[in-house]
Image (spheres, rainbow, N blue to C red):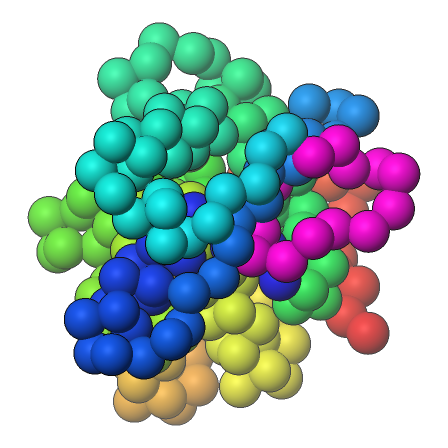
């Protein structure tokens, strides 16, 4: 299981305070394409090159926590960056592909949702309090075990899992799933399993579908196994 270092340390520190021996080592790998992976278990195969291996106990110290943060920031682009949309998109493509495979989603759909929600800004916060790349509300984040919505690894995993559940709930109807993502599944159910008559939600569905068409010009159809 790939995890963000921040999440591993948080679990370890909380366990230590509670007297539970739940410490785990952390590994940093880089693949041939330059993508960075932080994991709590060794990765097998020649595809990954081990950059470093740290013991969580030692990393809990302040000085080594700073080292972890420095390495983590190589993976997380700065919100104030002036990079183009395509460059920002490329920063998260491997993360999106991994979650698309995990939750049987089109990578293009995840890209479309993230583009509509945050324009690939991991520090984005909406006026309603939604956070991160996929703009998770605190309640939704808690439901899917996301402890840090500003952590792209956790955020995309939680958002993808929620989107998968919405598609299953609404019989693979993409429009209803997107409406549920924006307004909540309860609002879709309340309005007879139809897109709620909210201007924001209706505009959101149109926007994401357009971005999805941009991702897959030939068709917006999803393949659901």
Residue occupying the far right of the picture: 46
Front-lying residue, 10 or 188: 10
Q: Which residue is depicted at the point 82% across and 51% down?
A: 44
Instruction: Please indicate whether residue 109 sits to the left or right of residue 180 in the image.
Output: right
Quadrant containing the C terminus is bottom right
How far from the left and from the top, in percent, is residue 114? 45, 44
As displayed, is residue 46 above or below residue 158?
above
How far from the left and from the top, in percent, is residue 32? 79, 25
Q: Is residue 195 visible?
A: no
Q: In the picture, residue 202 is in which quadrant?
A: bottom left
Magenta stretch holds residue 152: no
Q: In the picture, residue 8 is in which quadrant?
A: bottom left
Q: Which residues are magenta?
A: 37-50
Q: In the picture, residue 224 is in which quadrant?
A: bottom right
Front-lying residue, 172 or 12: 12
How far from the left and from the top, in percent, is residue 82? 35, 9
As displayed, is residue 25 above or below residue 88?
below
């Amino acid at each position: 299981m790939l995890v963000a270092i921040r999440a591993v340390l948080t679990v370890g520190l909380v366990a230590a305070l509670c007297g539970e021996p739940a410490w785990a080592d952390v590994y940093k790998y880089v693949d041939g394409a330059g993508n960075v992976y932080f994991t709590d278990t060794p990765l097998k195969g020649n595809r990954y090159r081990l950059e470093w291996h740290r013991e969580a106990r030692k990393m809990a110290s302040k000085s080594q926590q700073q080292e972890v943060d420095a390495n983590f920031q190589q993976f997380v682009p700065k919100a104030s960056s002036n990079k183009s949309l395509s460059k920002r998109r490329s920063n998260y493509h491997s993360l999106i592909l991994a979650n698309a495979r995990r939750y049987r989603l089109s990578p293009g759909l995840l890209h479309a949702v993230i583009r509509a929600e945050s324009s690939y800004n991991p520090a984005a916060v909406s006026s309603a309090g939604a956070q991160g790349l996929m703009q998770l509300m605190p309640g939704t984040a808690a439901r899917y075990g996301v402890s840090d919505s500003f952590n792209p690894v956790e955020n995309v995993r939680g958002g993808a899992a929620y989107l998968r559940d919405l598609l299953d709930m609404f019989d693979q109807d993409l429009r209803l799933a997107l409406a549920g993502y924006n307004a909540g599944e309860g609002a879709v159910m309340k309005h007879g399993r139809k897109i709620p008559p909210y201007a924001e939600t209706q505009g959101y569905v149109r926007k994401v579908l357009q971005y999805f068409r941009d991702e897959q010009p030939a068709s917006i159809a999803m393949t659901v196994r």
